[in-house]
Image (cartoon, grey):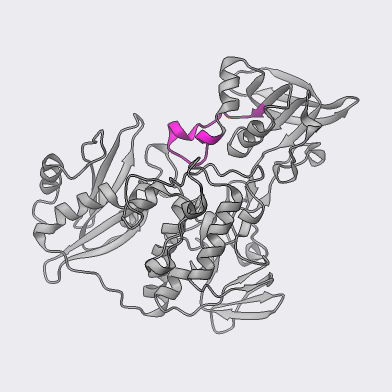
Amino acid sequence: MSYFLSALGLRHAMISADPGPGGMFRQFPLFQKLNSWSKPYPPVAPTSRHYAWYDWNSLLADDAAQHVLVPEFMDGSTYFPTREQMELGLVTFAERAAIAVRYGCRWESTRRAEGGGLVLGTSDGEYACRVAIFAVGMAEPWKPVVPGIDMVPHYAEAKISRQYAGRTVFILGKRTSAFEMADAILPWARQIVLLSPRPPLLSINTRSTAGVRARYLLPYEDYVLGGGVFAIDAAVSRIERAAAGYRIYASGTTRPGDFIFDVDLVLAATGWTTPLGDLRTLGLATFAQDRIPALTPFWESTTVPGIFFAGATTQGAVGLRKYGIPSNSGGVGGFRHNARVLAAYLGRRHFGLDLPKPRVSPDRVVPYLLSEASTAAELWNQRSYLARVVSFDASDGIRDDGILPLQFFVDSPGADAAAVVLETDQSGDNHPAVYVRRGNQVSEHALDGDPLLNFQSPRHAEQLSALLKGLL
């Protein structure tokens, strides 16, 4: 976020309670291996527009001298970087891009200024600002309200040791953190039970970062094969201490019935919450059991103007959720693109920047949009969420409006325009989708898919040309 603000010449202060760059990656993931890929030897050059599709962990830079790729620090034996490699990538980016940060400075309070804007109280004094951007992540451990859960250690407190050897381990949760823990203790534990009200979401199938990615599928395979791992759909009603460990009481969800589990150890992989400080006292609306701020398509609080979010918390802007698939804003691969878009939006709206919207000749519109659908990492990393937009004006001509949130395009009136996104439907087919606005009426159209993901064929050009007839 700071990099893109600086690139636009927008002066800002960046503060962090951390002692240095790296944020949560100074500690997590707990078991040292990320589940998002960075291919050391991708099929495209690192300078390619499409490269970021193959590297979900590197930050973006427009200047080649400031470009830092996480694969620089990997040996090629795997395309899942370690926690240490991810941290090193962030540290190196901050150094090469000369990101100015006041470290060891803790945000403590927030209030409205008399003349407008905000005042942030910190451990180093007050900061007055026109807008405030909180890139605080989903970084605090969260547990649901369940009697007895307070005595259960959270994922953040778990450790790999012989304490799991030959024991029955009960894990509350069936999403990424739960399967990460199960994967780590699989060689040790005699039996593992993963329990939550809903079935596990396998993101390889759902195209979502919300589920279990390939890195942690081994426990799920053991569950399917009956190898000592059990994934049960049930809601825990209470947890009690027993003579030999713990007793858990639960009620089945997908299969009705009551359960009682006697186990040696219990771990809570129940998720995370956003550290919102005193923002709720200003009227900040939240959802997901008060864990995530409710945001506009441009990542501003829906109830407190001037408060914006960057990073993982941008998942508070839920988008259209086409085919039920959420954004990728919970991970670096998605929210890094949001940062570029947000910086441009703030520049235009709050700081009077007249950012260029290049002209596009009529004969270039169709090949340009199809090229974006085939190669733009923003569209691939943020499917059905970020769009390339071209506007049509009889007096001003055809303009490239840039990358914008699809929800904003669909919900906002404006000039005749077309937005192209990449979609993955319920059958797993990848294809471009085109949203055409004429007279403030938006229509949606899916183009053909392609097994080699090339959407620049004569067939696609013919389809898109027909959709834009009369606009070109």
Q: Position of residue 123 (x, y in %)?
A: 72, 75
Up-down relation of residue 337 to residue 115 (above or below): above
Q: Position of residue 146 (x, y in %)?
A: 75, 37
* Residue segment shown in magenta: 194-215
Q: Which residue is drawn at 65% across and 21% down?
A: 230
Q: Is 178 within the magenta?
A: no
Q: In this view, does 110 lie to the left or right of 437?
A: right
Q: Which residue lies furthest to the bottom in this view?
A: 115
What count of labels does the image hold?
A: 0
Observer-nearest residue: 355 or 61?
A: 61
- Quadrant of the rendering where the C terminus is positioned: bottom left
Q: Where is residue 270 in the image (x, y as percent from the top left)?
A: 66, 40
Up-down relation of residue 293 to residue 115 (above or below): above
Q: Which residue is drawn at 73% across and 25% down?
A: 189
Q: Which residue is drawn at 39% across and 75% down?
A: 8
Q: Is residue 281 left or right of residue 332?
A: right
Observer-nearest residue: 242 or 293?
A: 242
Residue 380 visible in the displayed image: yes
Up-down relation of residue 311 to residue 258 (above or below): below
Q: In this view, does 28 lie to the left or right of 323?
A: right
Observer-nearest residue: 127 or 185?
A: 185
Can you tell which quarter of the image residue 103 is in? bottom right
Q: Residue at x 42, y 63 (%)?
A: 67
Q: Where is residue 355 in the image (x, y as percent from the top left)?
A: 31, 74
Q: Residue furthest top?
A: 226
Residue 382 visible in the displayed image: no
